Each structure stands twice: as C-alpha cells, then as structure tokens.
Amino acid sequence: MSFYTEYQTKCLIAEQAVRFIEPGEDIIVPISPGEPPALLNALSGHTKLAGNRLYHMIPSYPVLGMEEERIRQVSLFLSGKDRPGFHQGTIDLLPNHFSDIPSLLLQATTNRVIMATVSKIDENGYFSLGTSLSYVASLIDKAKTIILEVNENMPRTFGEQNQIHISQVTALVENDVNIQVLPNPKLNEKDFKIGQTIADIIKNGDTLQIGYGAMPNAVMEFLNDHRDLGVYTEMLPDKIVDLYESGAITNQNKTLYKGKTTATFALGTQRLYDFIHENEDILMIPCDVCNDVRTIAQFDNLVSVNSTVEVDLIGQCNSETINGKYYSSSGGQGDFTKGVRLTKNGRGIICLYSTAKNDSISKIVPKLSQDAVVTTSKNDVDIIVTEYGRAELKGKTIGERVKALINIAHPKFREQLIFDATKKGFLPQKNFYAKP
C-alpha cells in the first residue's frame, strides 16, 4: 500500500477517529500548540467513553466539560485554562519534574492513546510533532493507539523521536486551523531591571536555559550585543528569533548539540513558528532527554534562568503556590537547578519581584507561606535576583545567605526581615545593617 493510499484510508472525520478510543483507556495530548482541537471537541460525542483519563499540559483550549465518570482530566502543570478546574475539584494534578513525565505516565497509564496535532505528511510517509515533542515523543512507541490531527500550519521541525510514520497511525483527521500562539509578555520596569542584572551575569559563549514567564524573557532584551551564545532550553520562546537576527546566537561553543538550538517544545507567536519551520538549526528533543540532569551535566558554561513566587531567608523557593493554593507546578525548574550545579562553570539563577500587591507584601520572607511547597531546595540555589540586585547563595553560610537576601529585598521590609532573622537565630543579636 502506498503512503497516499494508506493516508486516505485512515483519514476520517474527528467523530469517527475518536471512536477508536475504548473505555478505560488513557488519552495523552501534547503541550499547546500541539493539542488537537478537533479531536478534543469530538470526545464529548463519544458515548462509549467510561473511566477514561485525559493527560494534558499548558492547554490553550478550554478543558472538557465532561462527566468525571467518563473522563477524568489530569494536569501535568497547572496554567490558566485548567487551574480553575483543579480548585473546583474537576481536574487533578500529577506532581512531577518535567524530565520524569514520560516515566511517570508509563507507570500511571495503560492502553495509551496519543492524540496530537502534527505537520503534513512528507514524501517518506512521516509526520513531524512540530512544536511539541515534550513527553509525547517518548511515548509514541508505547502507545496502543495513535490518532493525529494533520494541520498544514504546524511547522515541520527536526530532532530526536520527532517523526511518526503513517504505518504507526490508527486514524487521522485534517484540520488546517491556526495553531495557538502565546503573545510576548508585557514587561514592566521591574522586569527590565531583573533582566539587566541577569544579562550582566551571562558571558559571551555561554549556553542558556530560559524558563517560562516575563522575568526570564526580559533577560533576552539585553543579550543582543552578546556573541556566540548557545541555547539549550525546555521552552523555545519568541525572543530567540531576535537573538538569531542580532548575531548573538551561534551555538558554536556548546558541549552537546553543537551548532543547534535545542528545546523540547516551542510556544510563542507565528513569527516563532515560521522561524522554526524546516529550520535545520533547530533541534527538538524529548523532555526526558532535554531535562535529564545527566544530559545537563555534560554542558560547560550553562546559565539556567527560572522564576519563583517567594523565597525564604535561607533560600528555599516556592514556585508553585500562592496563598497556599496551587497555581502551577514544578516544571523543569528542579531539573535545571540540580543539573546546572553539575556542570563546569554553570550558574543557576532564580528570579522574582521583591514585592507583590503594590509593594505591600515582601516576597523575600522569614518563612514560606502557610501550605506553600518547596519547589527548589536551599541546597540547589546558586543566585537569587530581584529588581534590587543579586544574592549569591552557593557556598554561603546561613548568616551570609540571610544578609545577601535582605540586601535584595525591598528597602521598606529590610528592617523587619533583620528582626525576624535575628529572632530565628539566623543573625547574631548585635546590630546588623543590610546595605541597600
């Protein structure tokens, strides 16, 4: 059977394609924009679903309004679309490090169904996972059923485990809609100050891992004059295109994947998707490779930049909860904060605003909020950055850490932080002055 004939045989409408999913089977979809909207919409009309589970991460489409007895939805990282459902009890959360997701899903699921948006078929009968390899790429060979949504707007990318052959596919649908975009975050004065401080830490020839959010992305505003930067990151953001165009990125000094910008998923504007389409300089790899500390450890001069919600006076970071309620999850922060410490000349940076709610609340605190989780251990933190500067914690005593963190807290809270630290026995009773 030719590729074309097999393609035509397997090409169905969405309502027909999802009927290959049987009761009790576990459905896994990629990170947006790899979600398959037509297939997801068709699930509600599949009357035989019962006891199924749907695993997703950073969805762009509304979560399914289906009875829990039919589909139990499980988030791998809470974000805007699925966070309300978690707080209402209609969606569950699977704790994880990003690198662990494939192995956790192998343990937690049976009779796996992969549903994903892919690029158009090529002349050899292969589809590309495009923007969204992440955990799905590592599970393709472990799936019972593969149902694809073919979209001509999904960029074709190159990489490891990035291809699905038509012979592996159970059914497919065609749906040439615009894939989901993520607008560039709006940056404020604090973001720019934090970005400049971090950019000053980055040297020519370093390799970068840039996390999700406004603060990490602000760093890239100040890197256009750097040279011979490399990129080894989980999420490929929009600003990468600017750094290519300025000549800042060459990837020539990377220890691994030399000459290639390496990521496990891309999420940005159409400009980013156009840039990565059939771009041989971009290498997409699965998250259990990209975020594996054993892989990260092989790099030299790696700089990891991630954000947090609050940090206590000894360096423990809560990056997941606000007022004791889950807001997101660990993501790849733990992978890279641990991995970067194993590298030669690596620097792990955690950034946050010094305050919240119009400077009424300090985000550098004597102890983490009630019911907060520790996302990153005090032992895995190298450098903390706020709009007031940087605190280098690696190799520092408790007293030295406390002083360094108070020095980058908002000035209005420093006196109280000194008092609290002294009360806890972190600082001696004698006078201490934290320089602004």
Image (cartoon, grey):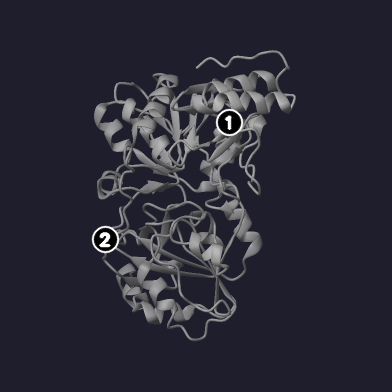
The one of 327 and 231 positioned closer to us in this rendering: 327
Residue holding disc 1: 297
Res. 261 visible in picture: no
Q: Secondary structure at mark 2?
A: loop
Q: Residue at x 61, y 42 (%)?
A: 375
Residue drawn at the location 51% of the way across and 27% of the way down: 412
Q: Earlier in the sequence, mark 1 or mark 2?
A: 2
Task: Write down the residue under mark 2.
Answer: 178
Residue 106: which quarter of the image?
A: bottom right
Under circle 1, the secondary element is: loop
Q: Amino acid at mark 2?
A: Asn
Q: Quadrant of the N terminus?
A: bottom left
Q: Using a 10 Å C-alpha cutoff, classify the residue at mark 2 as few (fewer than 14 neighbours), some (14 to 19) or many (20 or more).
A: few
Name the residue: 37% across, 76% down. Answer: 10
Q: Is residue 383 above or below residue 282?
A: above
Q: Give the CA separation, mark 1 to mark 2.
A: 38 Å
Q: Residue furthest bottom?
A: 47
